[in-house]
Amino acid sequence: MAPVAQVLTSEANGNASVGALGKRKDGKPLKVRSYPKFDSLEEERLYRKQHLAAAYRVFAERGFDEGVAGHISVRDPILPDHFWLNPLSKHFSQICVSDLILVDEEGTVVIGDEPINAAAFAIHSEIHKARPDVDAACHAHSVYGKAWSVFGRELDMMTQDSLRFYENHAVYGQFGGVVLDREEGARIAECLGDGKAVILQNHGLITVGQTIDAAAFWFLSLDKTCHAQLLVEAAEKGSGLKRTLIPKEEARFSYQQVGTPEKGWLAFQPYYDEILAKTSGSFLK
């Protein structure tokens, strides 16, 4: 498998060069943001940590925090069987690069002075182990995500945004309390398969991505998709209204426009820019 930077950059360059939308009227190519190239693994480590800290701030802005619940992880590029995530009791809105904790595949803290959430290790370690193509994972108890999770159903493909998850999400249909057992984490990873998202019954959402940016954006979009589905379910009941689903052929085609790793990375960049401006970059310290 090609390195993630190569995959994302080639996709972005390909999108920029195809058709009139990739060029100005005078024929000059338009600039499309793409995953950066790094001169060293140390540079890439810093980039991943900065975007991880930003993702926590973005999640806080959208109310995805709930006490010590919720966690986002990113694989370390230097030590691929290690990952970075948040300290146990630090609020998402306060997390900076210097707060991030590095743990090994056994959950032992390698860098950092605070413990991590035990559930974070149980879930994330097994996902990272089962999916070497995945460099980031997000889990939080967002309101619409956990509301939809009680139905134990996959989402209907009825909006353009829902198509990001076409044949690419699953439902983990059992609730076993707080996930503290690595075997439970392994079962969640198995349910995820090669997809990008899992709806945990009576619990919340998990999304994964080749980059922290993509994983974070998939989570933002998945929670909004749950919200839209809940609204449709409520509006349809007793009203005589009937939902129209998107046909499979159109859904499959549209997924390539909205659901690829490069599109997920790109879609998160405005959120990164916004939180950078709002905080004057305070999370970078």
Image (cartoon, helix red, strand yellow):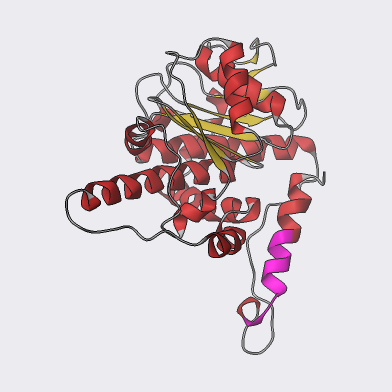
Taking depth in this image into account, of 23 and 119 the one nearest to the observer is 119
At 37% from the left and 61% from the top, the residue drawn is 244
Q: Which residues are magenta?
A: 11-20
Q: Position of residue 159 (x, y in %)?
A: 41, 58
Residue 15 included in the magenta stretch of the image: yes
Residue at screen point 65% across, 80% down: 23
Q: Residue furthest bottom?
A: 26
For the stretch drawn in magenta, the main secondary structure is helix
Residue in the picture at 27% in, 49% down? 231
Any magenta on residue 269? no
- Quadrant containing the C terminus in the rendered view: top right
Q: Answer whether residue 117 is visible to the viewer in this image.
A: no
As rendered, which of 231 and 237 lies closer to the eye?
237
In percent of width and height, residue 71 lies at: 49, 26
Q: Is 178 positioned to the left or the right of 5 in the image?
A: left
User: Residue 136 appears at what percent x and percent y?
Assistant: 62, 34
In this view, the residue in front, 85 or 210, is 210
Residue 262 makes an appearance in the image: yes
Q: Is residue 217 left or right of residue 149?
A: right
Indicate the quadrant containing the N terminus: top left, top right, bottom left or bottom right.
top right
Q: Quadrant of residue 78?
A: top right
x and y percentages locating residue 103 in the rendered image: 65, 17
Residue 166's place in the image compared with 98, above or below, is below
Q: Is residue 39 left or right of residue 242?
A: right
Q: Residue at x 62, y 26 (%)?
A: 189
